[in-house]
Image: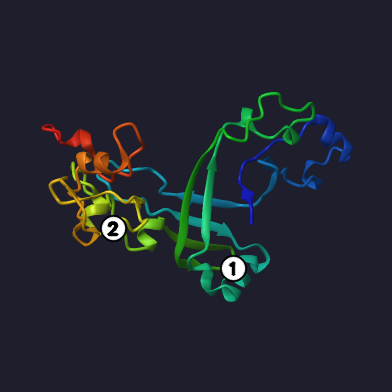
Amino acid sequence: MRFHAHNIPHTQAEIAAAGNDALRLKPKSIWWQGNEYEAYPYEITGLAATSDGSQPTPRLSVANLSNLVSSLCLTFNDMVQAKVRVHDTFAKYLDAANFPEGNALADASQERVQVFYIDSKSTETNSVVEFQLCTPFDLQGQQLPSRQIHGLCTWCIRGWYRSGRGCDYSGGACFDKDDKPIDDPALDVCGGRVSSCKKRFGDAQPLAFGGFPGSNLLGR
C-alpha cells in the first residue's frame, strides 16, 4: 500500500468540469519515483530523532474505512513486522506527472527515507487502527553503536580474520601477532593493527581494516 494524507486542492477547471461540485471529485494522488500514492487518511507521530542515542518509537494511525485495515489485520497477523517506509521530499522535486505542464525540477533522488516495522497493534475501532512502530534495530534486538570505536580491527577481535566477514584477506603471506613474516600458515595470526593490514595487502592497496585509526592518538 502506498498512500499520503496531504490536502491537494483542485483547480477551478477541475471543479467546473465536476459541475461546480467539489465533493464529487476524488482526492488527488501523488506520484513519486513512478509510483502512485493514493490519498488516504492517516497520521504518524513520534518521528523526531533524539540526542541520547535512543531510537524513535512512532505511532501510525490509519483510518479503518470499510473495515479495510481490520481485514488486513485478520489476514496478516495484525500486520506485525510489516515494513513501513516514510518518504520525505519537497513538492518541487515530485514527478512530472503531478503537474499539468510537467516539472523540469523533478528529481527522484531528492528524498529522505525512514524505515520502521510494525511492532504491535495498539488500538482498533470501527474508525481507526493504531500501530506501534519500531526501528529495524529494535526488531533485531540490536543496540547502537554495535561496534566500539577504537584503533584495533573489529574483524580481528571477533575472530573473522580471513573469514570473508569484514576481513577478505586470502593471500599467501603469513605473519605472527607482531607482524613478523612466518612460513607456517597454521601460525598465521593477525595483530589487528593498521600495520598488520598493510603487511598483508600492501601500503598502496585498499585495506579491509575494521577499526578506526583516527581514534588512536598514538597511532601505529
Q: Report the residue marked by disc 1.
A: 126
Q: Is residue 146 left or right of residue 135?
A: left
Instruction: List the single residue furthest toward the front.
Output: 183
Label disc, if present, on residue 160 of the rendered structure: 2
* Closer to us: 25 or 116: 116
The image position of residue 211, as x and y in percent, is 24, 43
| Closer-to-camera residue (20/113) | 113
Residue 184 position in % (x across, y down): 21, 58
In the visual, does 177 lie left or right of 106?
left
Question: What residue occupies the far left of the structure in this picture?
Answer: 218
CA gap between label 2 and label 1 equals 53 Å
Residue at 63%, 72% (x, y): give it: 71
Near-viewer residue (189 or 172): 172
- Which amino acid, mark 1? Asn
Question: Residue 8: where, in percent of width, then height?
Answer: 68, 37
Which residue type carries mark 2?
Trp
Q: Could you classify mark 1 by the number of other residues whose Cα lies within 10 Å: few (under 14), some (14-19), or many (20 or more)?
A: few
Sequence order check, earlier mark of 2 and 1: 1
User: Crowding near pointer 2: few (<14 within 10 Å), some, many (20+)?
Assistant: some
Left or right of 182? Residue 94 is right
Question: For numbered disc 2, what is the local secondary structure?
Answer: loop
Looking at the figure, which quarter contains the C terminus?
top left
**Looking at the rendered structure, which numbered label has been put on residue 205?**
none
Q: Nearer the viewer, residue 134 or 150?
A: 150
